[in-house]
Amino acid sequence: MKPIYGIALFFSLFLFSCNQEPTLQKYFVENTENKNFLALDISPGILNVDQTKLSSEQKTALQSFDKMNVLAFKLNDKNKAQFEVERAKISLILKDKKYQQLMKFGSGKEGASVSYVGSDEHIEEFVFFANKKETGFAVIRILGKDMNPTNIMTMMQVIQKSNIDLEQLKPLQQLMK
């Protein structure tokens, strides 16, 4: 009988040790199918860039970028209470110490923030959170490998030179109308 107790103890410790804290990744997964949200996964292919015309720094910056996840909540007359609840959930998640805030614009009720996960030179994730009480909010996660602030600035140059595939952004354009 003792092995059964050992196995039961092991599984209970395993289940207890699972992280029950809310994370952005869990939040995205939970709300992908919610009718109040628009979810998009955007690959680097959206940039439609001619790699031969990029500098080595630009190629490195582009290679550090894996994908972008967008989750947007469009506010309407029927979901105002839900908007407040969801906005509070995002704010709570971003207060976790793993999200290091770079900058913030506006107030808590309306504005934007930029945070990151990782160290200054090895950033795994950038998070942009923007909300406006008349239209809704959007959370954008930029995921990558060993991103750093220089890569992000260089990436902005690449984006300016790119021929963005707007077809991938159609759902987001519909939300903004």
Image (tube, rainbow, N blue to C red):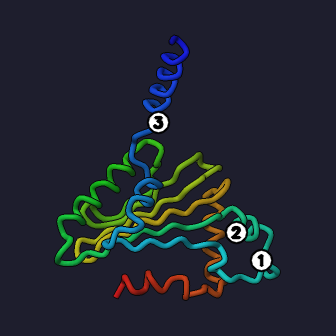
In depth, the one of 88 and 53 nearer the eye is 88
- Quickly name the residue at label 1: 54
Q: Nearer the viewer, mark 1 or mark 3?
A: 3
In the rendered structure, the answer to whether residue 76 lies left or right of residue 127 reads: left
The amino acid type, in three-letter code, at marker 2 is Leu
Residue drawn at x 40%, y 56% as measured from the top left: 27
In the rendered structure, the answer to whether residue 107 lies left or right of residue 26 reads: left
Residue drawn at x 44%, y 71% as measured from the top left: 39
Asked which secondary structure carries label 1, the reply is loop
Q: In whole angstroms, how far apart are the C-alphas of marks 2 and 1?
A: 10 Å
The amino acid type, in three-letter code, at marker 3 is Cys
Residue drawn at x 70%, y 69% as measured from the top left: 62
Q: In whole angstroms, how far apart are the C-alphas of marks 2 and 3?
A: 34 Å
- Does the CB distance between marks 2 and 3 fall below 8 Å? no
The numbered dot on residue 62 is: 2
**Quarter of the image where one finds residue 106:** bottom left
